[in-house]
Image (cartoon, rainbow, N blue to C red):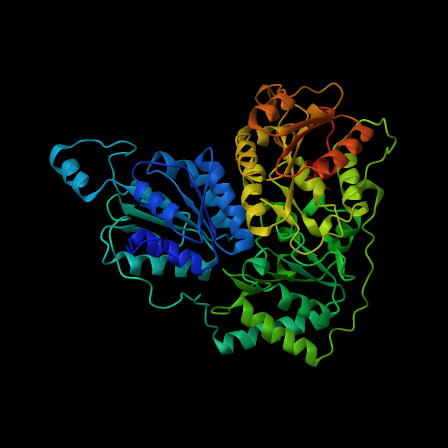
Amino acid sequence: MLKDNSFTVADYLLTRLRQLGLGKVFQVPGDYVSEFMEALEKFDGVDAVGDINELGAGYAADGYARFAGIGAVSVQYGVGTFSVLNAVAGSYVERNPVVVVSASPSAQDRLIIRDKGVLFHHSTGNLNADKKVFEQVTVAAEVLSNAAEAPLQIDRALTAAISKRRPVYLEAWQNVWGEPCREPEHPLRPQPPVSDRASLRAVVDETLQRLVNAKRGVIMLGIEIARYGLQEKALHMVEASGLPFTTTLEAKSVLDESHPQFIGTYAGAASCPGTREYMKNVDCILALGVIFTDDYLDLMQSDFSEIILVNDEQVRVGYEYFRNVAMTDYIDDLSAQIRSKNGFPHPLIKVHLDDGECAGWNTELGAQLTYNIFFDQLTHFFQERRLQSEIELILGESSSLYVASNINGLPQNSFIANAVWGSLGHETGCAIGVAMASGKRPYVVAGDGGFMMMCQSLSTLARNRINAVIFVMSNGVYAIEQAFVDIKAFTPEGRFAPFDVLPQWDYQSLAKAYGAMGYRAQTIDELQKILLDVESLVDCPALVEIVIPQKDLAPQIRRLARPS
């Protein structure tokens, strides 16, 4: 609701975003987009959250969208849009509807550019460059050149965002955001795909036949189950079928992991031994909402014909493809058929998820921390303090992400990963949006290389008084990169590639400079004390350096680098 009587194009967009459940816009200022920023400051119900750089703002919007259903980031033309591009690309591949708001030279300035050939600031000289770039990583890219048509363009883009669960780009000429326009007339609704009934019936029948004939079937759930709001439906299907279920790494905790049919997160070679063993012998995989990345390349090469894949881009049973089948219709119809058959007669095989390999071996208080010992201590702390339902565990692309795939028993929607796009540093920027949208406390585990890329986000956390806990796994190298370049570097006589060696940072001093509390742990007893200390922190983030041996190669990464 506005505080004055004017209603502009910027107000139209903000009203629509508020209607869709958005309460925060993450921004970095710029003169072109000043009309939008001024409208945002006056608008009741949507708050501006200033960030230090555009990439961090984009990561924050991505984290926010994961819980609010939509996110937004406002940046300057050219220098700002191109900086936020990486985050938006990640939102695109991981199905997060983020609205990118920008502005470009005004109508008057465009006349000068045309007549005088002046290159305006932050422009490449091609005034369509930003739009063309963002067309590659959005489902709608609109340039608003006049106030009369802007509402229709905004509605068209936002409808695409909420229907396809992907980002959109809205760039206005500098004068347009502040120009008056009509108010919204009716709520926006997603436009779900319509299934062809014959095709839907055929794929459901083929699926049932496969599941009935399978001797060792499994349901694999992917991140689209969460993005499209299908978790309850998926749970009912799992329980009706009686089949065990797993999740991809990106979708970890898409359902409550304490469920008796859960057999652990499947992350290829990085998975727990029990999960790997079960998946090795399956003869039918029902993959729902799954985005198969090259982490699952071995599975796709060995079991492609045994996979039933239903996601928002394709539907297939083995090598047979089906057109015009919506995932939600498929789940509804298949669930009804499964219930009518009272599930499948296969016995539920119990998979042991507490294998010693997934935990730390040495638990003496003075023992040196390693990847596995750290996660073993952290998860035990969450359990003992009964914090699982109060926190969000956030991981980006690093060795830690694959070690964390072995954690089990997490509540639904308590694990955030950037496992598809895999952008180093995503986790720290993402924590800001996650905290604001979920209301839960972020516990972030970052590699030191990734944290160095996005350390400024610690300042934004402090500025907004978010009591996130950022653990930096400090071994001084890009360990995951080195493992795939030359795993022999982790042997006693091995040497790291010069480009994988990181500078040494004083993390405690850095924390103080950014307004956070700084800690350092090298042993189990030091970590245990710090965990208790940071638990009581309010209105202030904590940065905890976890010192681990440079050559501690987690077994999960060793298996990925040298798959059996």
* Picture coordinates of residue 457, whole percent (x, y): 53, 34
Q: Residue furthest bottom?
A: 340
Front residue of this view, candidates 39 and 411: 39
Q: In this rendering, is residue 73 above or below 330?
A: above
Give percent across and percent down for residue 269: 71, 44
- Asked whether 322 or 470 is in front, the reply is 470
User: What residue is rendered at 59% in x and 75% in y?
Assistant: 333
* Residue 511, horizontal then vertical, whole percent: 61, 26
Q: Is 6 situated left or right of 360 in this image?
A: left
Horizontal side, residue 361 vs residue 150: left or right? right
Looking at the image, can residue 330 be seen? yes
* Quadrant location, the C terminus: top right
Residue at image position (72%, 38%) is 536
- Position of 193 with respect to 562 (left or right) is left
Q: Quadrant of the N terminus?
A: bottom left
Q: Residue furthest left?
A: 115
Q: Nearer the viewer, residue 216 or 123?
A: 123
Residue 76 figure quarter: top left
Q: Is residue 132 visible in the rendered structure shown here?
A: no
For this orientation, the residue located farthest to the right is 364
Q: Position of residue 206 (x, y in %)?
A: 61, 73
Q: Quadrant of residue 514?
A: top right
Report the label total: 0
Q: Is residue 30 above or below residue 43?
A: above
User: What residue do we see at 68% from left, 59% from top?
Assistant: 255
Q: Is residue 473 above or below residue 163?
A: above
